[in-house]
Image (cartoon, grey):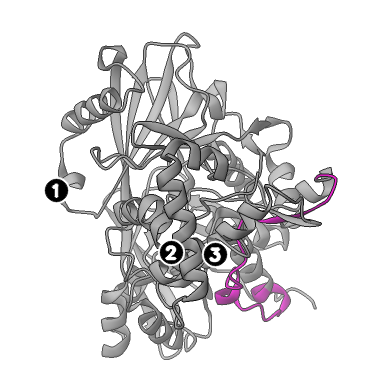
């Protein structure tokens, strides 16, 4: 099908992975989209921040995907600037480090014989008498791992991350992270090597030399080299709708107001914000639904440490209830080029919170001191070795799957489907906990819908409850081709995939 030549004013709201991918795909079809990004840099929640030459990844973003098209695009844009990195992460719990994902022998040995026996007994009980109706995260995990393991390794950390009880977090979030994996399958693997073993996490991944922001800056340059425009510091303040079409957007750029007409709009803006900015106001039902959708935010306390080597992990999950920090990134182990002075190291301590709460509003200086204290309390780094630090806040990082979100999202979807020249993409645009490769696919499909007349359903990208990094490994190991088909799992704060047979 031929490109539609009349599409001269295509606006892309948001300069994250989804928006930039949509814009790049549009330029590949000869269009010249205008990308509107509120911040002063591209990348969204996959951006890379910098401080005194040190670079900090907001969340930890591995580049690994089942999609050959996404992988090809990554390598087309960044090519030789990718590093192949080994994956290592552990869980800190009860003053001990556990392999992540959990290895049953390692975990049971560190928990003790009695506790290990009780965990197995609890698993058997829930296999015989499981929850019949499974709607919540707690029910889903308990049925597969037993209540005792749920209470030991899932409950407190998951609630730290999401800020809501596990009884309110929906089961489909867990299903996106775990599939066909139970404590029983892991235990059986001690005795037998299954013909098709479930391998839950990739062992290697690609990573840009200077962090994920390097990728998205390269996307921006590629878009602009093909005639597209990327406007930074451009805040969309109002979206003008007439009848069933978006006719343009009102923006503020460096204090200057402007109206940009639109023939078509692709938006990765949080869908709740998009609904609120429409004029005239949307129907009451859609407005109410948008107000009830929730997000979880986080902030990263970035610390510069006067020591060349700290620990081997890319990141560590902190299950210790005595500290607030949820996860710690070791950026030098992602890429040595993230650290300008190889005699030093840099860490990112991630604190999950809600925008506007006490933690979010704590001063940067106090947060740096908190990070230093908690590092010392955990025993990872002496406070005296931390020589400097800064803080970056990341709003609307994780769409929350609470008890009301399904109904609210359905109402919003119905309203948005009435806008004939509009598509919403990306994690926050679809209110779906997607990884960056999924977000990119929604951008690619939106561009194809527009210029090729395809009918891709963007709401159904990554809704098959397929575990993001799962791969079936035939007996004899995993071939290079099979490894290449495993799926990326980036920026995921909760280790729902806690058990592996390895």
The Cα atoms of the two marked residues, 3 and 2, are separated by: 17 Å
Name the secondary structure under disc 1: helix
Instruction: Tell me whether the residue at label 1 lies in contact with that at label 3, contact meaning CB atoms closer than 8 angstroms.
Output: no
Q: Position of residue 163 (x, y in %)?
A: 27, 58
- The residue segment tinted magenta is 449-477
Question: Is 40 situated above or below 135?
Answer: above
69 on left or right of 408: right
Q: Secondary structure at mark 3?
A: helix
Q: Residues within 10 Å of mark 3 (few under 14, many from 20)?
A: many
- Judging by the rendered image, the residue that carries numbered circle 3 is 176
Residue hosting label 1: 358
Q: Which element is circle 2 on?
A: helix
Residue 17 rendering spot, x and y as whole percentages: 54, 53
Which residue occupies 53% across, 54% down? 497
Q: Position of residue 250 (x, y in %)?
A: 34, 67
**Contact, CB < 8 Å: mark 2 with mark 1?**
no
Q: Tag 3 or tag 1, which sits nearer the N-term? A: 3
Instruction: Report the number of discs.
Output: 3
Query: What residue is pinned by disc 2?
Result: 428
Picture quadrant of residue 396: bottom left
Vertical placement of 227 versus 414: above or below? above
Measure the alpha-carbon separation of dots 2 and 1: 24 Å
The quadrant in which the C terminus is found is: top right
Q: Residues within 10 Å of mark 1 (few under 14, many from 20)?
A: few
On residue 348, the disc is: none
Nearer the observer, 201 or 126: 126
Q: Residue at x 52, y 61 (%)?
A: 434
In the image, which is nearer the foreground, mark 1 or mark 3? Answer: 3
The main secondary structure of the magenta stretch is loop
Residue for point 53% across, 85% down:
420
Whole-number angstrom distance, CA of label 1 to CA of label 3: 31 Å
């Amino acid at each position: 099908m031929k490109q539609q030549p009349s599409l001269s004013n295509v606006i892309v709201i948001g300069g994250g992975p989804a928006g930039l991918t949509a814009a790049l795909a549009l330029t590949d079809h000869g269009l010249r989209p205008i990308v509107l990004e509120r911040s002063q840099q591209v990348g969204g929640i996959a951006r890379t921040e910098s401080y005194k030459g040190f670079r900090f990844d907001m969340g930890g973003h591995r580049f690994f995907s089942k999609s050959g098209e996404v992988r090809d695009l990554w390598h087309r844009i960044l090519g030789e600037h990718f590093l192949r990195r080994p994956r290592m992460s552990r869980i800190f719990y009860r003053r001990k480090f556990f392999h992540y994902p959990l290895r049953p022998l390692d975990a049971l040995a560190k928990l003790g014989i009695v506790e290990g026996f009780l965990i197995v007994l609890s698993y058997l009980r829930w296999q015989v008498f499981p929850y019949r109706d499974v709607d919540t995260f707690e029910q889903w995990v308990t049925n597969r791992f037993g209540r005792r393991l749920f209470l030991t390794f899932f409950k407190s950390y998951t609630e730290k991350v999401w800020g809501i009880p596990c009884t309110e977090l929906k089961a489909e979030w867990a299903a996106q992270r775990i599939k066909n994996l139970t404590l029983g399958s892991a235990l059986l693997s001690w005795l037998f090597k299954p013909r098709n073993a479930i391998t839950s996490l990739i062992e290697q991944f690609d990573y840009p030399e200077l962090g994920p922001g390097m990728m998205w800056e390269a996307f921006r340059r590629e878009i602009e080299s093909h005639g597209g425009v990327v406007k930074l510091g451009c805040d969309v303040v109002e979206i003008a709708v007439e009848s069933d079409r978006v006719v343009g957007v009102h923006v503020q750029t460096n204090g200057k107001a402007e109206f940009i007409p639109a023939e078509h709009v692709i938006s990765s803006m949080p869908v709740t914000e998009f609904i609120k900015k429409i004029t005239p106001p949307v129907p009451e039902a859609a407005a109410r639904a948008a107000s009830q959708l929730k997000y979880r935010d986080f902030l990263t306390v970035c610390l510069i440490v006067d020591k060349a080597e700290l620990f081997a992990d890319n990141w560590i999950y902190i299950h210790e209830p005595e500290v607030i920090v949820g996860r710690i990134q070791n950026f030098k182990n992602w890429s040595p080029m993230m650290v300008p002075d190889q005699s030093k190291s840099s860490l990112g301590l991630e604190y999950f919170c809600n925008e506007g709460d006490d933690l979010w509003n704590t001063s940067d200086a106090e947060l740096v001191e908190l990070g230093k204290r908690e590092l010392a309390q955990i025993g990872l780094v002496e406070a005296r070795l931390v020589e400097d630090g800064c803080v970056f806040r990341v709003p609307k990082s994780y769409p929350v799957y609470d008890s009301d979100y399904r109904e609210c999202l359905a109402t919003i979807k119905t309203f948005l489907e009435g806008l004939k020249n509009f598509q919403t993409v990306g994690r926050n645009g679809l209110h779906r906990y997607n990884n960056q490769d999924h977000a990119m696919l929604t951008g690619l499909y939106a561009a194809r819908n527009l210029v090729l007349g395809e009918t891709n359903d963007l709401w159904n990208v990554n809704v098959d409850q397929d575990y993001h990094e799962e791969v079936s490994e035939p007996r004899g190991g995993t071939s290079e081709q099979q490894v290449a088909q495993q799926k990326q799992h980036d920026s995921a704060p909760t280790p729902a995939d806690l058990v592996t047979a390895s």
